Image (cartoon, rainbow, N blue to C red):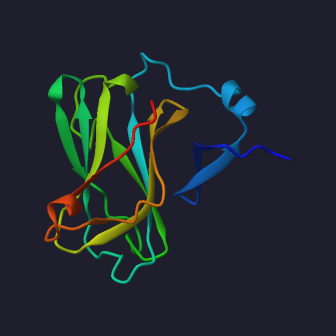
Amino acid sequence: MLSMNILVISGLLSLSSIIKPVLVIDTLENREQKKSISLRACLDSLYIMAFTSGLNNAGSDVGHAVKIGLTGGVTKHSLLPNLPGDDYQRHKGDLWKISFKDDFLLDYCVMKYDIKSITIMENSNDGWNIETIVTFIKSGNDYELATSDFHVKHWIDGNGDDSHRHLELTLVF
């Protein structure tokens, strides 16, 4: 019987120009064989995979944003891109790609240990209830899990309580 004790984001499949996330359950021994991103590698992208809960009014018609906190107190924001079709729908998952250069407007090399925080931010008064959210970073052809927040059922809403205006994600490195 497999020991299912670690959930790992292992990569992406590109099918018909639509990016689909691939989730893999690994055993501890398989995890040790995987290559992680080098400490000195420049990061290309941040991928955000979020699943909207099934609560009433959990979906949103308006996009929200991500904020990244970096070494030296630098913070950068980016809107989550509008995806083809409907985003933020109840019982559905979405995958966004955020470029460090083009979306965060960073003109220098960001390495994984430069990342101090990743936060989902409200960008409207149309609430969104996040069930589960994970992020991963990409450098070249290598991907690594950056945050992991399961079953949070957290509202992101501009006209909600202060606690609903953001969700700081849990870094795993």
Query: Where is 20 relative to 139, above or below?
Result: below
Q: Examine the rendering and report whether any part of residue 111 can be seen.
A: no
Residue 148 on image: x %, y %: 46, 46
Query: Where is 55 relative to 108, above or below?
Result: below
- Give the residue displayed 16% in from the left and 28% down from the top: 73
Residue 107 on image: x %, y %: 22, 27
Q: Nearer the viewer, residue 54 or 83?
A: 54
Please state, as top left, top right, bottom left or bottom right, where the C terminus lies in the image: top left
- Give the residue displayed 52% in from the left and 35% down from the top: 143
Residue 67 on image: x %, y %: 24, 45
Q: How many callouts does the rendering have? A: 0
- Residue 166, quarter of the rendered image: bottom left
- Residue 5, quarter of the rendered image: top right
**38 with respect to 46 (left or right):** right
Q: Residue furthest bottom?
A: 56
Query: Where is 76 relative to 129, above or below?
Result: above
Q: Examine the rendering and report whether any part of residue 3 can be seen.
A: yes
**45 with respect to 164 (left or right):** right
